[in-house]
Amino acid sequence: MAFSTGGRINTNIGANQAYSALNTISRELGVHQLRLATGKRINSAADDASGYVISKKMEGRMRSMSAALDNVGDAQSVYGVAEGAYQTVADILTTVKEKQTRAANGAMGSEEKDAIAAEINSLMSEIDDISNQTKFNGTTLLSGTAYSKSFQVGEGSSDTLTVAFSLVSAGGLLGVAAGSVTSANIASLTVDAGLTTVNTEIGKIGAHVNRLQTKESNITTAITNTEAAKSRIMDADVAKEQIMASKLSILQQTSTAQLAQANSSPQAFLSLFR
């Protein structure tokens, strides 16, 4: 560091040094004030190049996992819609089983059995209506073309889960098309097989929903942990920054005072000309 006795006033070394120190302190003070204002330790790549790059990678991972978490929620919703329909169909099949058993009563006359057949036909039509009306986001789940969609349920492109359902129709479950049930073929209805098919689908849905709930918990934990790691890199320690800002504010004031003093020091030599 250069020093001057003050006798050479054409270049005021002391004032230049005080000015340089003031600029340095003001610049550092600005950095800490910005950190306090934004709450971030890294506001640009220049603050910490490697930390900035790492934090951006973490941010990309968190956003990907957040999207995957939304996908998990959508998959659960699809399963929920399908499960509700399957359960209603199972309830209807149970009612059909009851009617079938009732029709196997030797005390029943032909009119009573015809009435039971008509009721079963009505219930079967309802099964088909449920199948056609079970939709998610405009897409049918249990009728038409078999539903089979892939959901990305993790941050990696290979972390996928296929959501698929078996088609539901009254004829497929009971062995007779809706409207074709008569008193003569009530006993041949495959109600037990239909119930087994529907209940098997409900069981599969339950297993997949449990799996999705586990994935949801894991992804949520991963997002929280990644956010914490990013916070350690990016976020400012407010207490520390305030201490530094207070110190630099005092130094800024003392530097300003010393600059003023250095600027006035050469005037002492004016006494030599009196």
Image (tube, rainbow, N blue to C red):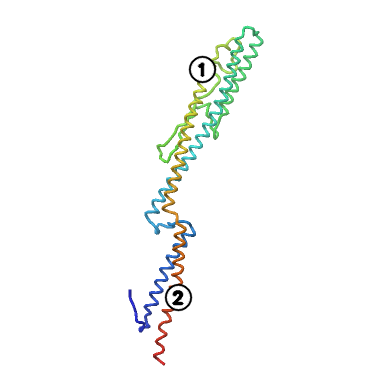
Is residue 174 placed above or below 131 in the rendered structure? above
The answer to which of 98 and 258 lies nearer the viewer is 258
Q: Which residue is mark 1?
A: 193
Total numbered badges shown on the rendered structure: 2
Q: Of the residues shown, which amino acid type is indicated by label 2?
A: Ala
Please report the residue visible at 45 percent of the width from the left and 74 percent of the height from the top: 256
Is residue 135 placed above or below 3 in the rendered structure? above
The answer to which of 178 and 45 lies nearer the viewer is 45
Q: Quadrant of residue 65?
A: top left
Residue 272 percent coordinates (x, y): 39, 90
Residue 75 vs residue 92: left or right? left
Label 2 to label 1, Cα distance in Å?
Answer: 95 Å
Residue 212 vs residue 14: left or right? right
Q: Of the residues shown, which amino acid type is indicated by label 1?
A: Ala
For label 2, the crowd category at 10 Å Cα-Cα, with few meaning under 14, some 14 to 19 and many 20 or more, is some
Judged from this view, the residue extending furthest toward the right is 111
Judged from this view, the residue extending furthest toward the bottom is 274
Quarter the N terminus occupies: bottom left
Q: Which mark is residue 257?
A: 2
Q: Which mark is residue 211?
A: none
Residue 153 percent coordinates (x, y): 45, 37
Q: Are marks 2 and 1 in contact (CB under 8 Å)?
A: no
The answer to which of 8 and 249 lies nearer the viewer is 249
Quarter the C terminus occupies: bottom left
- The kind of secondary structure element at disc 1 is helix
- The kind of secondary structure element at disc 2 is helix
- Point out the tag, 2 or 1, that comes first from the N-terminus: 1
For label 1, the crowd category at 10 Å Cα-Cα, with few meaning under 14, some 14 to 19 and many 20 or more, is some
Please report the residue visible at 45 percent of the width from the left and 75 percent of the height from the top: 257
Foreground tag (2 vs 1): 2
Please report the residue visible at 42 percent of the width from the left and 68 percent of the height from the top: 25
Residue 32 percent coordinates (x, y): 45, 62
